[in-house]
Image (cartoon, coloured by chain):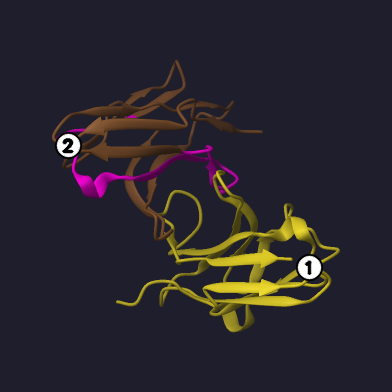
Chain colours: A brown, B yellow
Amino acid sequence: AQTVTQSQPEMSVQEAETVTLSCTYDTSESDYYLFWYKQPPSRQMILVIRQEAYKQQNATENRFSVNFQKAAKSFSLKISDSQLGDAAMYFCAYTGTASKLTFGTGTRLQVTL
Amino acid sequence: EAGVVQSPRYKIIEKKQPVAFWCNPISGHNTLYWYRQNLGQGPELLIRYENEEAVDDSQLPKDRFSAERLKGVDSTLKIQPAELGDSAVYLCASSLMGGQYEQYFGPGTRLTVT
């Protein structure tokens, strides 16, 4: 079974600074997709960024980018120029051939002034 | 375009009582998911529908949980009877299709069983 591990329960970053959230996963599949979802205190989960495993190029979405290391099974999220609105729970998630989204336990990000 | 709608937002019941949650997915989304999110954890899939067919219900505790998706649109998740351990947030999500397609989540229903 696939597993997703987020080893940082909480992280803190100052406004305008850069922070990196870690995620590792375990799978025997070669074709899969990885996601970072954001869940603000209001609870509605939204997609931040998506990475296809067959693509070597790291995905980027404005201030959000990933460092995808397929051999190491690592998928970290970098947030640049952090803003107060970035404060939330961030979940790393995996989906493969079973079309089932498996989430990590989440990292709570605090943004300070 | 309206997002995924869930009701109620909050529900408090006594143990052994029944409870039902309702979800209306984004129009045109064929795939619908129900997740349970315990405090401090990531969501865990309970059931996935492709149109009106439940294609993955392996994590649904079938002795007390049931779900339906009539006409492949709205869905209802029911618990009967509820137990203290069922206290959690129940999330509904939808996507165009399964697999790599982005899932859009509703606001969830926070269930408290006393």
Gap between marks 1 and 2 measured at Cα: 44 Å
Q: Is residue A78 visible?
A: no
Image quarter for residue A57?
Answer: top left
Residue A102 is left or right of residue B58, and the answer is left
Q: Which mark is residue B82?
A: 1
Q: Amino acid under label 1?
A: Ala
Q: Which residue is mark 2?
A: A15
Q: Are marks 1 and 2 in contact (CB under 8 Å)?
A: no
Say which chain tag 2 marks.
Answer: A
Nearest the viewer among B2 and B107 is B107
Q: Amino acid under label 2?
A: Glu
Task: Tell me, yes or no, whether the highlighted magenta stretch contains residue A86.
Answer: yes
**Rendered location of residue B95, percent (x, y):** 45, 62
Quarter the N terminus of chain B occupies = bottom left
**Rendered location of residue A76, percent (x, y):** 36, 27
Task: Tell me, yes or no, whether the highlighted magenta stretch contains residue A101.
Answer: yes
Nearest the viewer among A22 and A86 is A86
Q: Secondary structure at mark 2?
A: loop
